[in-house]
């Protein structure tokens, strides 16, 4: 119990209410407002922006300092010195693996990359031109119908098996969505490849010839997965936790997270970057659009600059910029008009006093959009790839909640509708 308390005085209530104050390892203190319910009152916090809805040991963000820690490790160290599956192990189990533990984990994930053969026929129920995220919501939710041998959420082994299956099968499903959209045959996973390399193989390979995946592109994709692996209590992660609090199976919970991620205010940000570049159209129009972005009365906004959480800089952006430079150099892309616009916007953002003063630096979405565009991945697939990387974060938060003490989520409301009134028969209205 906390020794510190906040005292709240409310008009109409004679006795002051004492509310415990708790401190985390790092970050702001929190006030426990649970005692208000017994007084017939709730707090009002639209968007839950001032509410800690859970206790977690997984990820910490300090937006003012530009800090992102996974289990205490800075994101740039993980992106530069680790790989995605090692980061997955860290998020799931709390510690970096030994060499033996990592080998076992990688082997386990690799051996789970295949999906049930009947899932291929499940795809036929979708239109070929369906949005990839629409298909992902359906097929991930359907996994519970194919893998119902690991749905006992109270069994720690079942939870672990479900986690391994989700991490392993998401790249396979994502690649199947892409292949289905373009009318090409599905590609089987290749167990000789690593996680990111295998994903690119399933995306761009074909059965007629062996895949030849560039190590530079595979490394860039691995970094994209790492940099999107978790981001604390955002909209999709909170959705997964809320769905999980009802006792729903993990596949259903991750499908709920995918649905939340689909929103343009969340996972669609890098997609919005490409749409902005297409709207600008030509490097000769950049000055005009930058001027519009600076005009408070103009609704146009430059996408991919600044961040609602990071008030200083996005710690993921520097690493992603390095990958963007490496990918563009590897592919030798010089004449793509959208990438030319992006590179010029980046130069302006890093040099223009307006952007520097307002700390509107290019963020992770800006650079990831450039990388994915350069690789030839269609814009509609950007959020799907985000979902692949974020799956481990979702499942880690779900597992943390289910394995501890929790209660079903039940947000309250400030009701402003009609008070009770009597029904009026049809002939009297």
Image: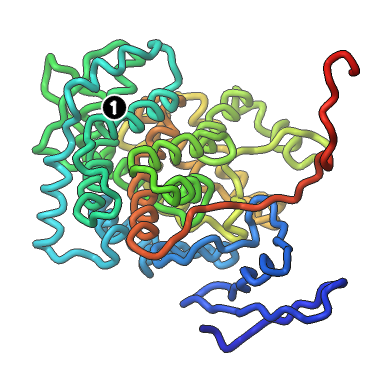
Residue positioned 25% across, 23% down in the render: 204
Between residue 350 and residue 277, name the one nearer to us: 277
Residue positioned 33% across, 55% down in the render: 399
Q: Is residue 421 above or below residue 54?
A: above
Q: Residues within 10 Å of mark 1 (few under 14, many from 20)?
A: many
Q: Quadrant of the C terminus?
A: top right
| Extreme residue in the right direction | 428
The image quarter in which residue 147 lies: top left
| Extreme residue in the bottom direction | 3
Q: Is residue 10 above or below residue 232?
A: below
How is this picture coloured? Answer: rainbow
Between residue 151 and residue 363, name the one nearer to us: 151
Give how far across and how far down residue 217 sits, in percent: 28, 37
Q: Is residue 29 visible?
A: yes
Q: Which residue is mark 1?
A: 175
The image quarter in which residue 221 lies: top left
Give how far across and how far down residue 71 sits, in percent: 36, 66
Residue positioned 57% across, 29% down in the render: 277
Residue positioned 44% across, 51% down in the render: 245
Question: Left or right: 361 with respect to 109?
Answer: right
Question: Left or right: 215 with respect to 260?
Answer: left
Q: Is residue 326 visible?
A: no
Give how far across and how far down residue 96 sits, in percent: 24, 65
């Amino acid at each position: 119990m906390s020794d510190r308390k906040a005292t709240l005085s409310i008009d109409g209530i004679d006795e002051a209410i004492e509310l415990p104050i708790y401190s985390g390892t790092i970050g702001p203190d929190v006030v426990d407002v649970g005692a208000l319910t017994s007084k017939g009152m709730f707090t009002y916090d639209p968007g839950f922006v001032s509410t800690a809805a859970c206790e977690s040991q997984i990820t910490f963000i300090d937006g003012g300092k530009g800090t992102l820690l996974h289990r205490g490790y800075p994101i740039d160290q993980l992106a530069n010195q680790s790989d995605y599956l090692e980061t997955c192990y860290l998020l799931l189990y709390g510690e970096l693996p030994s060499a033996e533990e990592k080998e076992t984990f990688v082997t386990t994930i690799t051996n789970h990359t295949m999906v049930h053969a009947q899932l291929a026929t499940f795809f036929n129920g979708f239109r070929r031109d369906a949005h990839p995220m629409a298909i992902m919501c359906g097929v991930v939710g359907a996994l519970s119908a194919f893998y119902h041998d690991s749905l006992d959420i109270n069994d720690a082994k079942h939870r672990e098996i479900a986690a391994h299956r989700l991490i392993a099968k998401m790249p396979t499903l994502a690649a199947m969505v892409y292949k289905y959209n373009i009318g090409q045959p599905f590609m089987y996973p290749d167990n000789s490849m690593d996680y990111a390399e295998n994903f690119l193989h399933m995306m761009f390979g074909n059965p007629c010839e062996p895949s030849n995946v560039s190590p530079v592109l595979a490394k860039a994709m691995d970094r994209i997965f790492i940099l999107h692996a978790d981001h604390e209590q955002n909209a999709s992660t909170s959705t997964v936790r809320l769905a999980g609090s009802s006792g729903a199976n993990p596949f259903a919970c991750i499908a709920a997270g995918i649905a939340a991620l689909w929103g343009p205010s969340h996972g669609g940000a890098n997609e919005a970057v490409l749409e902005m570049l297409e709207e600008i159209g030509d490097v000769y129009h950049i000055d005009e659009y930058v001027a519009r972005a600076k005009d408070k009365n103009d609704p146009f906004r430059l996408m991919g600059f600044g961040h609602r959480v990071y008030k200083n800089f996005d710690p993921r952006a520097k690493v992603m910029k390095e990958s963007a430079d490496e990918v563009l150099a590897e592919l030798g892309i010089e004449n793509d008009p959208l990438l030319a616009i992006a590179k010029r916007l980046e130069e302006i953002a890093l040099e223009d006093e307006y952007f520097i003063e307002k700390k509107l630096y290019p963020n992770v979405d800006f650079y990831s959009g450039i990388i994915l565009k350069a690789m030839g991945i269609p814009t509609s697939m950007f959020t799907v790839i985000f979902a692949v990387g974020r799956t481990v974060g979702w499942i880690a938060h779900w597992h943390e909640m289910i394995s501890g003490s929790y209660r079903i989520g039940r947000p309250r409301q400030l009701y402003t509708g009609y008070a009770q009134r009597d029904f009026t028969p049809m002939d009297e209205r």
